[in-house]
Amino acid sequence: MFVDYFNIDNARNYCYHSRDSSSKRVGIMQKRLSPSSMNTFKTCPAQYNYHYIERAPGIYVPRHHMDLGQYVHDAIQDYFDGASKKPTKSLEITQRIDSSFDKIIGNKFVGQPEMMKKLRSCLKNFKEFEIYRARKWKTYEPTFIEKNLQDDDFRGIVDFYSEPEATVIDWKTGYKQNLNDNDTMQAEVYRYLLEKQGYAVKRVFFVVLTNGTVLQAQLQKDGWVLEQQKQILDSIAAKNFPARPNRYCFNCVYQIACEFSDTNLWDDYL
Ligand code: SF4
C-alpha cells in the first residue's frame, strides 16, 4: 500500500500488525493478510517488504492525521457503548455524541487549526449520519463495533456491523470523494471474514466523516479476495518487491532506505 497515513483504518491495521508478537513468525505473518498489508503490497511491494518482512526501522513522519482518526474512532466507540437502543429524538443522539467526543478528544487538538477544522467536520457529519440512520434503520444499535476478526487467511477490524441490516460501516477520517481498489479490498476482506462466521453482508458503506459522503462498495464475486490473496502470496514467495513510487511517498517511513537501496555509500559518495 501505500500506507495511507491519513487513513486511520489502515493505520490501525498497521499498528495492530506491529503489536502482534505472533506476526514475528514469518510463516503466519505472510499467510494471514489484513486489508492494510494487502493494500501495502499492491501499492508498493518494497514498502511491504520493509515493514512486514524486514521489519526495518522507519524515519519519523508527523502523524497528527492518524492520531485524530484514532481518537475519532475511539469517541465513536464510546458513543455506541452508551447509545440508546432506538433514539427517538435527535437531541438524544447529538448530546451523547458531544459528550463522547468531549470525553475522548477534549482539547487535544486545540492550537492546531487544520486538525480542529477536520475534527469539527467529523463531529458534525457523524451526528447527521446517525440522526439519518436512527430514522431509516429498523434496528439502530450495532450488532458489534470495532470487532477484531481473523481466520487462517485474513484479519481485520470491523468498525460497525449490523446483522439485521446485513451492513458494514467503515468510518473514514481522511479526505475521499470516490472509492478505490484499496477500499474494495478492505470491503471484501471484511465480507469474507464476516460471512465465514455466519454473518450476512449485503452492503459495505464507507462513511467519509470529513465531507459527509457515504460511499457504497461494489461487492465482488465470491472468491475474488482469495484470488487477490494468492497473487500476493505468490509474489511474496518469489521475493518480488519492486519499489513503486507514488504520491504518498513523502509520508513513507522508509523513504530514506528506499532512496538509497541501490546505492553503495562508500563507492558512490566517498
Ligand atoms: S518511498 Fe519507496 S518504499 Fe516508500 S512508498 Fe515510496 S516507493 Fe515505496
Image (tube, rainbow, N blue to C red):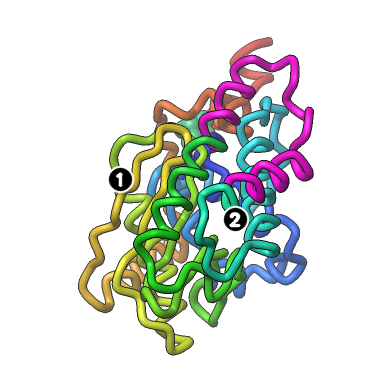
Tell me what residue is drawn at x 54 percent, y 81 percent: 151
Image: 1 above or below 176: below
Q: Does the residue labelled 1 lie within 8 Å of ligand 1?
A: no
Q: Which residue lies furthest to the left in this view?
A: 221
Name the residue beneath numbered marker 1: 180
Name the residue beneath numbered marker 2: 13
Name the quadrant containing residue 268. Answer: top right
Q: Position of residue 18 (x, y in %)?
A: 70, 55
The answer to whether 20 appears left or right of 151 in the picture is right
Q: Is mark 2 within 8 Å of ligand 1?
A: no
Front-most of residues 261 and 226: 226
Q: Which amino acid does label 1 sit on?
A: Asn
Image: 182 above or below 20: above
Q: Which mark is residue 155?
A: none
Q: Does the magenta stretch include residue 223?
A: no
SS for callout 1: loop
Tell me what residue is drawn at x 63 percent, y 33 percent: 253
Residues rendered magenta in the picture = 94-122
Image: 152 above or below 159: below
Q: What residue type is labelled 2?
A: Asn
Q: Which residue lies furthest to the bottom in this view?
A: 198
Q: Residues within 10 Å of mark 2 (few under 14, many from 20)?
A: some
The secondary structure making up most of the magenta span is: helix
Q: Can residue 241 be seen in this snapshot?
A: no
Q: Is residue 102 magenta?
A: yes
Which quadrant of the figure contains the N terminus?
Answer: top left
Q: Which of marks 2 and 1 is nearer the N terminus?
A: 2
